[in-house]
Image (tube, rainbow, N blue to C red):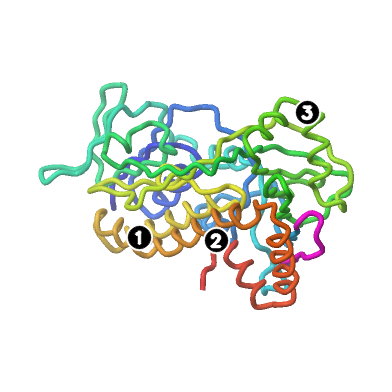
Amino acid sequence: MVQIGIIGGGPVGSIAGLALKNAGHTVRLFDPTTQKPQMSLALSETTLVLLESIGVHLTTGQDLVEILVTEKGLPGSMLLNAPECGHPRFGRAICSHDLDHTLTAQAAGMVESSAVTQVRARTTTGNPRIELETGETLEPDLVILADGGRSGLSDDLGMGAQLRSFDRTALLGRVTVEKPVNGRAYERFIGTGPLALLPIDADMYGFVWSLAPPDADALKQSTSALLDALYLALPPELGGVELVCDVVKIPLVERWIDQPYRPGIVLLGNGAQTIHPVAGQGLNLALRGVSRLVDALATGDPDTAVRAAFTSWKPNRDLTRLASSSLEALFDRGLLSRKLLTSIGMALGDQSPWLKRKIGEAGMGIIS
């Protein structure tokens, strides 16, 4: 049994806490925040398996059965169908508010509202140390930083992140459509930037739209202009569109720490890596790391377990980073020659069951 302190009570920290507690470890979780940002999430099948294993049963959202990849104005497309790929679903789309609500109920009594003021790594003479604003000090066997990198604690530990701007801004929100297609998600590539659309209710979709900053600013300031732009950008089969929540604007910056651990300390989630959101893989990637860590702690001391978990997770981490950032680079180009090549590529890919299965399984968290 290992004593663990977790800093950050978002989805990554909460799920890690529940998984580690279920594995028999002693867990204290610290998170003073009460407001969580709302966004739409595409939970992969491996994430859903992890949630079920710790007693988190989702009753909202929609199963992702199909993913239609298209480019506006060109005929080429690729339709990924889960049963045709040998799986009942690719995952599940859900509003982050619903996931937070479920996790809060499941983790009731485990979260402490005290803020952490300092963290120190393990030394030759003692365990890592957590200092709270209350003056309390604790020395667990392992500290997990899952605060999204917002606190600056990782910088204080000398784990500075590499930052790379995409020179893009994401608009996130939810819409209702006139003619929904049950269980179908969309990856839509248009002249202004890639647009992901997730079915989270009967006629409601969450969207993530990557845009040039001036375009994002203009659409954020005018609901009517945004609705007009969305109507033109979305697949025609969905019909009319209405906005159902305030739109969130996020500058797109990749944050990356090559080795996100120190003696007695490991970073999980956006604090260790923040990747491009259009592919929807950030949370799934982090939770694959959580699963590896839980498994490794069953067979080794904390530092050995962290190194083993990271070594086994690193190839998947690197591949997911590359795939997510490449989507923007591949499709965010206005050249007609590039458009024709990608359109032809999608049309050919749509005829390859093997390729479609591999792409679908990659989104599920299955890499083979």
What residue did someone put label 1 on? 309
Disc 3 versus disc 2: nearer the observer: 3
The kind of residue tagged 2 is Thr
The answer to which of marks 2 and 1 sits earlier in the sequence is 2
In the displayed structure, would residue 53 be above or below residue 276? below
- Relative placement, left or right, of 315 versus 304 is right
Q: Earlier in the sequence, mark 1 or mark 3?
A: 3
Q: Residues within 10 Å of mark 2 (few under 14, many from 20)?
A: some
Q: Position of residue 181 (x, y in %)?
A: 83, 55
Q: Name the residue tied to disc 2.
A: 46
Magenta span: 71-80
Q: Secondary structure at mark 1?
A: helix
Residue 31 sits above or below residue 300 on the image: above
Residue 35: x, y in percent?
Answer: 55, 28
Classify mark 2: helix, strand or loop: helix
CB contact under 8 Å: marks 2 and 1: no
Mark 1 crowdedness (10 Å alpha carbons): few <14, some 14-19, many ≥20 = many
Q: Are marks 3 and 2 in contact (CB under 8 Å)?
A: no
Residue 310 appears left or right of 192: left
Q: CA distance from mark 3 to mark 2?
A: 37 Å
Front one among 292 and 140: 292
Q: Is residue 166 magenta?
A: no
Residue under label 3: 223
Residue positioned 49% across, 40% down in the render: 107
CA distance for labels 1 and 3: 46 Å
